Amino acid sequence: MSDPTQPGRLRLGVNIDHVATLRNARGGALPDPVRAALLAQEAGADGITAHLREDRRHIRDDDIAALMEALALPLNFEMAATEEMQAIALRHRPHAVCIVPERREERTTEGGLEVAREADRLARFIAPLAGAGCRVSLFIAPDPVQIAASARVGAAVVELHTGAWCDLVAEGRQQEAEAEFARLRDGSAQAHALGLEVHAGHGLDFETAAAIAALPELAELNIGHFLIGEAVFMGLGAAIAEMRDRMDAARA
């Protein structure tokens, strides 16, 4: 396992939503997402991400309470910018809150948050969360307008949406993938220059995570679906350890 105090070390946040998806497909209590979070903690994760959706399709309210009680690692609470979710976050006061766009009909989060057009509303929404001690992150596309707006509304962090780039890589569309990677590279530099901490996530696998880990401004990658999928074949601890090793090698 890598040394968490290593200078310039890129943090790994593990999203456990799809352990809860598997549990909910059958009903009952198993597999337990809290157990998955504890395994991730042992395997070298630096934080745990859980998205409490409006429709509770995977993570449930009692999962958030159980995670807050059980974890020594920071919890990154993903949520939509609604009054209901704000109240839950203020009740639990997780280490971090990541605000994401959310539509009931989507399979997974599609696209980034529209910050520029919603700047006034988001600034009012963020203020009490920041005041409660939560580090507020905005999940956005690597768009210069959205990055600049994120700095203005009081976010501490932006998480750049890597999904479009990962899709282009998977489809073998090299020229378009290179252009999208350039947007991620330039967006990371812009956000860092504006004083924002820079995270990235969505659709990352071993290869794409290693590629983007080389961007020096990035402080954290958040990865879920791929790691839970790989756990079927190699075990969750081994999948996280492999991801951790590839990230560290990319930074070495």
Image: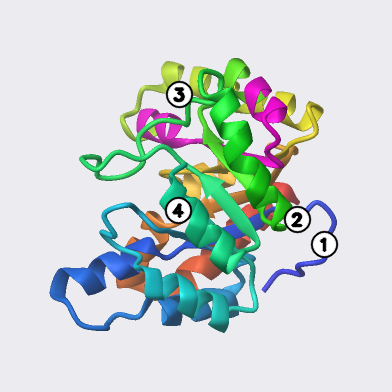
Spot occupied by residue 55 in the image (x, y as percentages of width and height): 26, 54
Specify whether residue 98 is in view: yes
Whether the residues at callouts 1 and 2 have beta carbons within 8 Å, the answer is yes
Question: Identity of the amino acid at label 1?
Answer: Gln
Spot occupied by residue 245 in the image (x, y as percentages of width and height): 61, 62
Mark 3 vs mark 4: give the one in front.
Answer: 4
Q: Secondary structure at mark 4?
A: helix
What's the mark number on residue 178? none
Mark 4 vs mark 2: give the one in front.
Answer: 4
Say whether disc 4 or disc 2 marks the residue closer to the N-terminus. Answer: 2
Count residues near mark 3 (Cα–Cα under 10 Å), then give few for <14, some for 14-19, many for 20+.
Answer: some
Bounds of the magenta segment: 148-168
Say whether disc 3 or disc 4 marks the residue closer to the N-terminus. Answer: 4
Q: Is residue 145 left or right of residue 131?
A: left
What's the mark number on residue 9? 2
Q: Is residue 162 left or right of residue 32?
A: right
Q: Relative to 28, is 197 above or below?
A: above
Q: Relative to 247, is 146 above or below?
A: above
Residue shown at 63% from the left, 33% from the top = 123
The one nearer the camera, 219 or 247, is 219
Question: Identity of the amino acid at label 3?
Answer: Ala
**Label 3 – label 4 distance at C-alpha:** 35 Å
**Label 4 – label 2 distance at C-alpha:** 31 Å
Q: Is residue 71 left or right of residue 67?
A: right
What's the mark number on residue 6? 1
Say whether disc 1 or disc 4 marks the residue closer to the N-terminus. Answer: 1
Specify whether residue 237 is in view: no
Tell me the residue that label 4 is attached to: 85
**Label 1 – label 4 distance at C-alpha:** 35 Å
**Label 1 – label 3 distance at C-alpha:** 31 Å
Question: Identity of the amino acid at label 2?
Answer: Arg
